[in-house]
Amino acid sequence: MNKTLNSILLRNVAIFNGNNEALIDGMDVLVEDNRIAKIAKSIPIPEGAAVIDAQGRTMTPGFIDAHSHMMLQMSFAEAFNSDEFYWAYVSTQTARTYLNNGFTTIREMAGNSFSLKKAIDRGIVEGPRIYPSGPMISQTSGHSDHRTDAQKSSMIASEPSVPMKYDMVQIADGRAEVLKAVREALRRGASQVKIAVGGGTGSYADPMDVTQYTLDEIRAAVEAASDWGTYVVAHAYTDNAIQRAIEAGVKSIEHGNLMTEETLCLMKAKEIWLSPQVIVYTYYPHGYNEDMKKKHDQAYAGIDNMFNMAKKVGLEKIAFGSDIITDPEMMERINEEFVHRTKWFTPPEILRQATSKSAELLALSGPRNPYPGKLGVIQEDAYADLLIVNGNPLEDISILTRPKENLALIMKDGKIYKNIIN
């Protein structure tokens, strides 16, 4: 017996397909189940198909946030005084916020999001596709070490921080512990693995300039991930940290704000991805002390130089991400990242970063890819993750900062989550 397809015909759209510089006007897109079945002018209406006339509006692929923290949207004080159930409940709100803002896929860069992903995939919770990393892994005194002075040294006591207890982060020292931490993440279903190889702004014990993990420890993470057919990403800001990570086989650098042209040239030569963010540095996450604010300012000050050098050397492997933490109100404003990038990139470049480019990065997970298929593009047989927009974001990308008004239709996996087209 032939299966009956669920068909939706989207008529008269102007398509940004994830790659093109200009819109392709007057097109129809036929969606069958969760895939794009046909793209053409004047597609005949299939029997039983629902028809939506977009009246010339713009269609784009669903957006991708390649550096998300779905599980970390509460203040430090709230997080450190809540149980893991509350963390999970808050994450469902974040998931819906992402979808409302047009993000149909995210790459989770630290957090125990495995069960949230499962709930979204099964239709229990509404939200984007999740590429989970599991806990961010770092050394003792590294970016994942959120213990305070109230906690004893791990040499004499086992007193994990709350994020570590809930597997949002993990600490691992030496080859054996790193191997085990990576394998534990893979056991839960990590599509890629994240480690921290340098200081960060959101951790009080590690200055920005320090390099974390020895070459052998980083190689251990890369070897364990490679054995599963996937890759390692590294939180890093400085030349020493980034160059060591690249030498060890890391494929994606998260942040990179303080690196020099030499390191960017190395990234280009080695085909390493840069996964940068702007919006997170425009505010102080809740709970930052004065030292953390100074580090945050230092990171923000490096963004202009990093992007200018990236343009100069011709680095094309640049993803789109936000890195927003601790602040649900900022999450509502996530689409401001599109406008922040206009200082260095054109709207078509930014939209490519948020669609096809980030999809290329996600595909590095190989056999661990939880959604094998075409993402971030409008092509036949691609996943039907589609947005219909009031206005042309290739000309005025700021319209995306008003998603309630200007995202007229949001579709993920062939299912319509929003439709305000008259």
Image (spheres, rainbow, N blue to C red):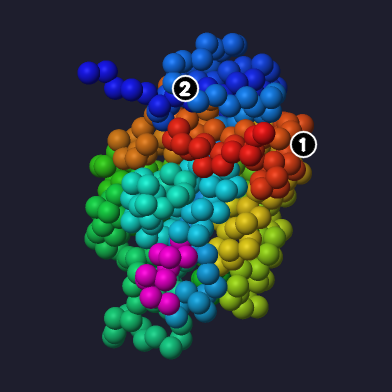
Camera-side residue of 17 and 310:
17
Secondary structure category for the residue under label 1: loop
Q: Residue at x 53, y 69 (%)?
A: 74
Give the residues in magenta.
Answer: 82-91
In the image, 370: left or right of 50?
left
Which numbered disc covers residue 396? Answer: 1
Residue 95, position as x, y percentages in the image: 49, 54
- Is residue 95 positioned above or below 347 on the image? below
Q: Is residue 364 visible?
A: yes
Mark 2 secondary-structure assignment: loop
354 magenta-colored: no
Q: Residue at x 53, y 28 (%)?
A: 377
Question: Dot 1 surroundings within 10 Å: few (below 14), some, or many (20 or more)?
Answer: few
Residue 70 or 40: which is nearer the viewer? 40
| Whole-percent x, y for residue 177 in the image | 27, 63
Spot occupied by residue 293 in the image (x, y as percentages of width and height):
65, 71
Residue 123 bears which disc, if any?
none
Residue indicated by mark 2: 49
